[in-house]
Amino acid sequence: MKRIFIINPVAGPRNPAEMLRPKIASAAETYRESVEILETTHKGHAREITEQYAASGEPVAVYACGGDGTFNEVVQAAVGKPWVMAGCVPCGSGNDFVRNFGGRDAFLDIKSQLDAQPCPVDTIRTEYGYSVAICAAGLDAKVAYGIPKFKRLPGCGGSMAYKLSIVEVFFGPLTSRLRIVLDGREQVGEYLMMAICNGRVYGGGYSAAPYAMMDDGLLDVVLVRPIPRLKIPGFLTRYREGLHLNRDGEIAPEFQPYMSFCRVRRVELESLGRHLLIVTLDGECAPRKVLHAEVCPKNLTILLPKGLAPDKMAVKKP
Ligand SMILES: Nc1ncnc2c1ncn2[C@@H]1O[C@H](COP(=O)(O)OP(=O)(O)OP(=O)(O)O)[C@@H](O)[C@H]1O
């Protein structure tokens, strides 16, 4: 089987190719595998490369070496093609995808990656593409959407841009009037944020759905109604830790006035207000009027490095 490592040279703080090329070359020598290392030259290139290899119909393992954006490109080309296996070597800034499986370390071990196990998982199909982990909308998506604008200011680094975006969002309208349809059941109301989860973690480590499984054919949906402004920081701290839910899907008492949770197959969102809703699909943000999200059971094969501890995984051990 061919194994293709696609490196995004602009992912993370510095070009990951320097670090990865020698590691991949030495691991590949030991394993005598048919390994190729490629670098992207433009946005969308990782998807194009994956599509080219997929077209042959031969089994191929494609490793996205970068952040969630690069992995997401490989995923778009791999869904619905069981012969194309999508791996991730995390060298980006956030890399939320690998947090669903205990973090970066196992995924940075190239030998374990060459020995990785194929594992079919669900995806979320939307009109804007597929998401593997989480589609989110509202407050946190707005903060993420604002960051690039502040990053362009002279002398403004990543963490300063993040803080400035939080300040901007907090002084603007926080909630949105939405029509939400969950497996055909419609509700209309004012919402602060929501997360439609196949995986467990997003946004740099927020455990929105701490018990979501990527292979159960269901989406864990968390809806958050308006919260008094002063209570929001405390709420977000505990939400980040995943303390709002238990294993049976019951909401912790302190969250009950503001939050609801359900497991469904299909979600529709429509913004009824003057402003568009900021929606993020695995970290890629855009303003939208509507979002249709539907679970596609086991239509993507991901690669999990050998030796991952089963208790840390968002999928059943293959
Ligand atoms: N050669 C390239 N030149 C410019 N942009 C690229 C290139 N290759 C990929 N991209 C785009 O770069 C963007 C950032 O990549 P990626 O998300 O992988 O890294 P990151 O932002 O550091 O990590 P994370 O998303 O996990 O925080 C993505 O939108 C990706 O499509």
Image: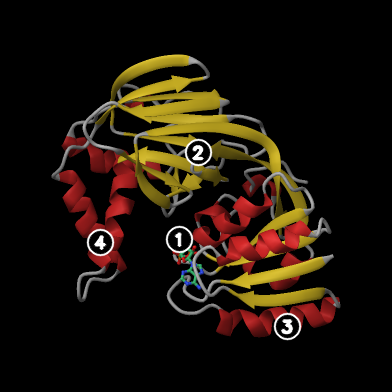
Dot 2 beta carbon under 8 Å from ligand 1: no
Question: Which residue: 86% across, 78% down?
Answer: 32
The amino acid sitting under disc 3 is Ala
Q: Are marks 2 and 3 in contact (CB under 8 Å)?
A: no
Which callout, 4 or 2, points to the residue nearer the camera?
A: 2
The amino acid sitting under disc 1 is Gly
Quadrant in the picture for residue 84: bottom right
The local crowd at label 3, few if under 14, some if 14 to 19, many if 20 or more residues have their Cα within 10 Å, is some
Question: Which residue: 27% across, 41% down?
Answer: 234
Tell me the residue that label 2 is attached to: 127
The amino acid sitting under disc 4 is Lys
Residue 280 screen position, x and y as percent: 41, 46
Q: Is residue 143 left or right of residue 94?
A: left
Q: Is residue 228 left or right of residue 298?
A: left
The local crowd at label 1, few if under 14, some if 14 to 19, many if 20 or more residues have their Cα within 10 Å, is many
The answer for how far apart the CA atoms under marks 4 and 3 are is 38 Å
Tell me the residue that label 3 is attached to: 25
Q: Judge by depth and name the residue closer to the eye, 34 or 270.
A: 270
Q: Which numbered disc flags the more N-terminal residue, 4 or 2? A: 2
Furthest-top residue in view?
A: 185
Q: Is residue 87 left or right of residue 96?
A: right
The amino acid sitting under disc 2 is Glu
Instruction: Work out whether 52 lies above or below 172.
Output: below
The local crowd at label 4, few if under 14, some if 14 to 19, many if 20 or more residues have their Cα within 10 Å, is few
Q: Judge by depth and name the residue closer to the eye, 277 or 189.
A: 277
Q: Which numbered disc flags the more N-terminal residue, 1 or 3? A: 3
Q: Are marks 1 and 2 in contact (CB under 8 Å)?
A: no
Q: Which numbered disc flags the more N-terminal residue, 1 or 2? A: 1
The local crowd at label 2, few if under 14, some if 14 to 19, many if 20 or more residues have their Cα within 10 Å, is few
- Per the image, label 4 sits on a secondary structure element best described as helix
